[in-house]
Every structure is written in structure tokens, then in C-alpha cells.
Amino acid sequence: MTQLDLTTLSVRDVNAALHQVSQDTFHLLNPGGAHALACGLNAEISVTVEGHAGYYCAGMNKHASVTVTGNAGTGCAENIMSGEVHVRGDVSQSLAASGHGGLVVVEGSASARAGISMKGVDIVVGGDVGHMSAFMAQAGHLVVLGDAGTDLGDSIYEAEIYVRGAVAGLGADCIEKPMETDHLATIDQLLKRANLDANPKDFTRFGSARRLYHFSIDHMDEY
Amino acid sequence: MCGIVGLFLKNEALQPELGTLTTLMVHEMVDRGPDSAGFAIYEAPAAATKISCLSLTGDTDWAALSADIAQTIDDAVEVVEIEDHAILHTQGDGARARNRIIEIAPDVTVLSVGHAIELFKGIGDPDAMTSRFGLAERAGRHAIAHTRMATESAVVIAGSHPFSTGADTCLVHNGSLSNHNRLRETLRRNGETFQTENDSEVAAGYLAWRMRQGDPLEGAIEHALRDLDGFYTLAIGTRDGFAVVRDPIACKPAVIAETEDWVAMSSEFRAIAQLPGVTHADIWEPKPATVYAWSHAA
């Protein structure tokens, strides 16, 4: 186990240290809201940020497991490829933006545009998500135990959204869809991986109506 | 980009520390706005009116100017010079004094008028700016500050925040307004005076105008949410209070933290991370189109 203290080390030093090993457990002390902590990790290491992180924490994560004990700022786990990012507090906007894979868990709430353009990442949020979450979401799952803000799933492709609480409004081409057995199993599995407790049957499923991104011969005159 | 900070002290015992704490917060926001800075500091309201003035030429004859103002408002005017700024103190009519300065002194910008507020701004490194005006030595009840990264207009002092057009009202703004030209004309017809072409000054003028119509601060901001078009996170200082609002899209960042002793807001958490007792603070991101306000008077 290695401790790295941000009061004496720069973010560049800390990230360089995290990039040099193929396995270890790290604790980042006194993060103080610094940006770009634990970014670009590419090994099966475990990193715990002891406090609040700034922007882009755990961005581009591959293989590593990153935990933030406090809150995280804009773009947490953006472009995550694999591995796991777990935030005990809240996160700001654009959570896991463009994420290709892996699991992102937020115990608190995420603000606007959570899962924007997600491309395969699985996201589980214990609290609420803000407006325009899953905007242009292409693949992956967004599970929300609380409420969702306005324009949920606007211009969505083939990602799946499951919300337990209230939805303030759906975006263009996002509709409620029937919940089948395999969807319940997906929610159950994601909740277990996130270590969050909820009944899959309490969730509502949302996805694409497929009217926006599919070419329709009836619309030929529009082009 | 730009960085904004605000600090509202609930615990009177912290008042001597206001300037020191605000200086620390501004320092953390230098990366977000390295080319200009400004701050407004609010003391307990005094009997006298304080008029914060900036000399654009750096060689303004403050004695001559204050003599003219004294004659206009028929009351004594005392001048305290600080670098290229001067604070005029008078028991007389502050609003008339402000209008007179704007009328006769094109080399002077009136930054604020009020019983509680003093306002300073400058271009260049924000740390150097706060040091030049002795922010760390200042006591008070609340303060707001701004670090500017000019993206759409020149690095000139006219573009520096905070902006104040009404008594004891000022704001700092991160974002841009798209309907400021038309709104400025509407406000001019309603008697507001503006000293720059800056969009944020229009937001300040709008709030001052609404409050002159009788709106409380929260009511004025509710109207602003309907009438201001653009992107904004605003921190607003008034004689007794402090408020934060974000536009309905909320793409400009903001975080608020509150303890028993203080309320702080900033563009980013790192500016708040230095404050005493922050580990026990409630920390949250203000929701879109929602007004958050605190007042010493309540």
C-alpha cells in the first residue's frame, strides 16, 4: 500500500507514480479538489482518493479500480474504457461522458448530463441525476435509484435507462418501454455489482423509439 | 472560463478573517481567470455613503473632483486613495454624487455606491491584484470576487468584475448573455445608467432596477431568470446578503458549501477546500434556475 500526499506532490507526480506500476494499492491524501487525479490509468491497480476530487477524476480509466471518498467534479470517469470508478459522495456534470466500458457507481447524486454520449459503460447512481442525462447515449446502462431531471435520454440510440424515482421529462425520441425478465436481471446484476440495495421491479425502463436516427422512406422529401 | 467566489460569514467572530479567507479563495481561481480580477467587500452598513471610484488614467485629481461633488450634493466629501482607486465618503446623497461623477469625470469609473460595499478591480495577475489592494487585511461580513479569462473582449478594466449599478448591489458573472444589448436599452429607458458595453453590467443593472421596483433580492433574481438570455452562474452581493443562481441549462460550474460559521460558493471546490471546518461542511451543486440566498438581516 502506497500513500501519495497532494500537499507535497504535484498532480503530475501522483499520476506518474500511478502509471509506473502494474499492481498496487494507493491512497491519495489531501486531494483538495485538484483536477485530473488518477487519470489515464492502464493497470489493475486500486486507488482511493481520500476526500474531494476536482474535474476529470479517473478519466480514461482502463483496468484500474478508483474510489473517491468525497465528491467529484465535472467529467468524473469520462471516457472510461474498463475497470471501476466508485464515488461515495456526489458528482458534478458529465459523469462518465463517452464511456466505452467498465462500471461507474455514484452513491450520492450526479448533476446534469450524466452518461452523455455513453458508448457501453454501465452507470449506477444511488441518488438523482440532473437534466439531459444519457443525452445521445449509444450503448450501456444507466440505472438511477432516485429521480431524473428534464430531457432524460434526449436523442438516445441503443443505451438502456432504468429509473426508480420520478422523471421530470423525457427528451426527443426517448420513450418508456416494457420491462421484460432479462431487463430485471440486468438491473439486479448491476445493483449487486454496485453494492446498492433496491428492488429491480421498482424501476421503469426507458430507451429509444428509434424514430430519430433510423432513415425512414416516408421522410424522403425532408432530405 | 472565469472563476467566481463568494463568502458569507454567519459567525461574527470570523469577520476579521474575511479578507484573508477571500484572498485564499481567489488564489485558487487564478487558473480559471489569470488576466483580471476584482472583489467587493461588505462591512456592516455605515451611516456614511461610500463611493468606490477607479481612475482610468491613473492621475485623477481626487481633491478637485471631491470638491466639485461636495458642492453638487451640498455636503462634505472625504477621500481615501488606494492605488488607482479612491473611496469617497459622504453623509450626503450618494446617488446624486455618482451621477455627477459620471457626468463630469470621463476618466473615472464609479464602481459602487452604498453604505456597506467597497469595490476594487484591476487587470493582471489576480494574486497581485488582491495584494495591491490589501484584501487579506480587510474585515467584513461578506465578499464576492472574480477572476477573468477574457474570451470575447479585450483585457481592459471595463471588462473586470464585480459590477455594481445600484446601492450596495453587485454581482460577479461566469458566462455570457446574448440579449444584453436590447436589455441595456430597455433599462436605460427606465433610468439606469451604464458605464461599459459589458454584458455582465447589464445583469447587475437589471437586478438593481428590479429591486428599485420593490422586489426583494430573491424576487429580482426570479425575474432575471425569465429576462436574462444566456449562460450564467451569478454570485450576488447586497447590503445584507448574498445569493447564487445558475441559468436553466447550468453549464457554468458552481459549488456551495455551508457550515454553522459560513456559506461559501465558488466555481470549483478547490477554492473552498482551504476554509476552516470545511471537512464538516454540507457541500452541494446548486440546481439550475434555483435561487439560493442568505441574509444577515433574517
Image (cartoon, helix red, strand yellow):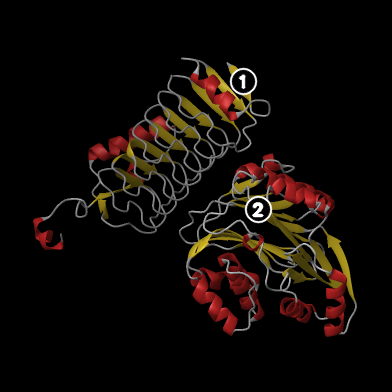
- Counting from the top left corner in percent of width and height, residue A145 is at 42, 45
Which residue matches tag 1? A3
Which residue matches tag 2? B36
Residue that appears at 87% across and 68% down: B79
**Camera sees residue B5:** no
| Quarter of image, res A115 | top left
**Split into 4 quadrants, where in the image is the C terminus of chain A?**
bottom left
Residue that appears at 50% across and 76% down: B182
Residue that appears at 66% across and 79% down: B212
Residue that appears at 69% across and 44% down: B27
**Camera sees residue A166:** yes
Residue kind at label 2, given as amino acid type: Ser
**Secondary structure type for disc 2:** strand
Most foreground residue, B184 or B216: B184
Is B88 drawn above or below residue A87 in the view shown? below
Within 10 Å of disc 2 (Cα), the crowding (few <14, some 14-19, many 20+) is: many
**In the image, is A52 to the left or to the right of A171?**
right
| Quarter of image, res A220 | bottom left
- Separation of marks 1 and 2 at Cα, in angstroms: 38 Å
- Counting from the top left corner in percent of width and height, residue B72 is at 83, 84
Is B2 drawn above or below residue A192 in the view shown? below
